[in-house]
Image (cartoon, rainbow, N blue to C red):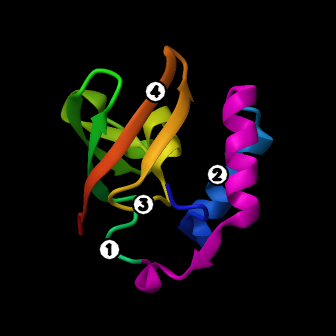
Amino acid sequence: MTNNIVLTTGIYDLIKDHLRRKKTTIQEEEILTTQLRNAKQVLRRELPEDVVTIDSVVKIKDHTTNAEEQYHFVPSNKEKIKKGKYSILSDIALATVGNRVGDIISWPFRNGEKKIEILSVQPVS
């Protein structure tokens, strides 16, 4: 897992606000606070293409179950889970945002700790 996540300033501010509103578990808050403290902030056009961000389709492997799933991360107001569109502030997005293809992440999901790997990231225009 990469030590420092890479975020656009907008996503950084969005996550910081999400934490301020106490919308996460204590474990998530600790991880995210540490990640934000060490995060590299960049402009959208400077964000590497293999980094998970908003408006991207991300393929993830759950090492706990060996299942692979695909998620399309969108702004919170455009979330449509039945269509595979997840808010950038959803649990799976918060666990992966700012990470790169190949990163393996341990995350305290509400249904238990999971180890997930980012298999691919595709920007959606």
Query: Looking at the picture, which amino acid does disc 3 mark?
Result: Thr
Q: Quadrant of residue 42?
A: bottom right
Residue 49, disc:
1
Residue holding disc 3: 53
Residues under labels 3 and 4: Cα distance? 20 Å
User: Quick one: label 3, few (<14), some, or many (20+) residues within 10 Å?
Assistant: many
Q: Secondary structure at mark 4?
A: strand
Please rate how many residues cluster around mark 4, counting C-alpha atoms within 10 Å: few if below 14, some from 14 to 19, many from 20. Answer: some
Span shown in magenta: 24-47
Characterize the local packing of mark 2: few (<14), some (14-19) or many (20 or more) Cα atoms within 10 angstroms: some
| Three-letter amino acid code at the position of disc 2 | Ile
Q: What whole-number distance in Å separates the C-alpha atoms at marks 1 and 2?
A: 20 Å
How far across and how far down the image is residue 14, in percent? Answer: 63, 55
Left or right: residue 71 versus residue 9 is left
Q: Give amino acid for label 1.
A: Glu
Q: Which residue is mark 2?
A: 15
Give the total number of marks visible in the rendering.
Answer: 4
